[in-house]
Amino acid sequence: MDQMAPTGPVYQAGTLSGNPIAMRAGLTTLEHLTDPAVYEALGSRSHALVDALANEAKNAGVALQTSVVGGMFGFYFAEHTVNSWEEAETCDRERFASFFHGMLEAGVYLPPSPFEACFTSTAHGDSEVEYFQAAAGSVMKTL
């Protein structure tokens, strides 16, 4: 802190810079994230969402490829596996756009591009997975 203005040469400003509530929230979050169980739960939740999405696509006869790692997942509307940028570029972007807008209308916000990752959080629970699956099932039937 000796480097920070007014005693040091580095100027720092921001709406919540040094705000005690923001600092406590940040510290509490970091403490929470030191628990390995948090990451296991994120991975499990991501797999549950991807499994739900894949099942609904299969039920609707829609070709879908998925990938998941930890609290991140992605999916492509494609017949073939997607392991490279070149393969990702060949996915059905129009179908993705239709799915994105259908999910948005159902109250599920996904990244607007098939080239972006989806994220789960510790706030996502079983009811969110169930809601996601129901919405995905309804939207998949329209594709």
Image (spheres, grey):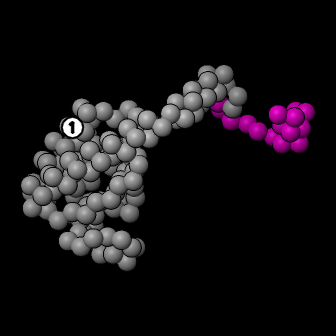
Q: Quadrant of the C terminus?
A: bottom left
Image side of residue 26 versus residue 143, left or right = right
Magenta stretch contains residue 105: no
The reply to whether residue 105 is in sight is no
Q: Nearer the viewer, residue 37 or 97?
A: 37
The residue pinned by badge 1 equals 131
Residue visible at 35% across and 55% down in the picture: 68
Q: What is the quadrant of residue 58 in the picture?
A: bottom left
The spot of residue 64 in percent (x, y) is 21, 63
Q: Residue furthest bottom?
A: 86
Look at the numbered disc 1 and give the secondary structure of its residue: helix
The tally of labels here is 1
Instruction: Give the quadrant of residue 6.
Output: top right
Q: Which residues are magenta?
A: 1-16
Task: Give residue 4's position: percent from left, percent from top.
Answer: 83, 37
The residue located at (25%, 39%) in the rendering is 129
Q: Residue at x 32, y 41 (%)?
A: 45
The quadrant in which residue 23 appears is top right
Where residue 78 appears, as percent x and y from the top left, is 23, 69
Toward the viewer: 44 or 132?
44
- Name the chief secondary structure element in magenta: loop
